[in-house]
Image: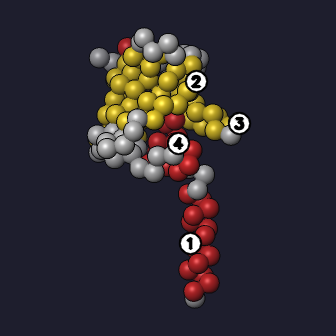
Amino acid sequence: MKRFVFLLFIFGWALAAPLTPLTGIPVLPDNTVVKMISQDLTSNYATGIIRRNTLILTAENARLPANETVHLWIGVPNEETRSFKVVVSKDGKDCHLEIKGEKISFATLLREAYNVKLEWKAP
């Protein structure tokens, strides 16, 4: 029985391990602030706050500039803000982080690793 519990623990850890280290952020609680900023740091393309497991990003025309590289800033309460370079999708409704040579959808990462739904709205 002890072996089974140990194997179950190892299996669960192996499944979760690829998701958590991607960003180095173990949880995204309510009041986490997310921003999408231009590479030259002069334009704020989108801003949002996580509330009730939903991130509503407010952006001009409810989308980001397509195919552009931007900074994704994630500010978890009581932690340092983390910054990632991401590439915006063709439709401007998602972006992709590059992790170990693999492109990962931000919306998918939010949903699968953090149980957070991504929504867009115009100002």
Give the CA separation, mark 4 to mark 1.
22 Å
Secondary structure state at the residue bearing disc 1: helix
Callout 4 secondary element: loop
Residue at the image point whose x is 62% and y is 76% from the top: 7
Residues at badges 2 and 3 in contact (C-beta under 8 Å)? Answer: no
Q: Which residue is mark 4?
A: 23
Q: Please, which colouring scheme is shown?
A: secondary structure
Image point (37%, 36%), residue name: 75
Task: Residue type at mark 4: give it.
Answer: Thr
Q: Which mark is residue 87?
A: 2
Three-letter amino acid code of the residue under disc 2 = Val
The residue drawn where x is 63% and y is 33% is 98
Indicate which disc residue 101 carries: 3
Query: Quick one: label 2 or label 3, which is nearer the N terminus?
Result: 2
Percent x, y for residue 22? 57, 44
Give amino acid for label 3: Gly
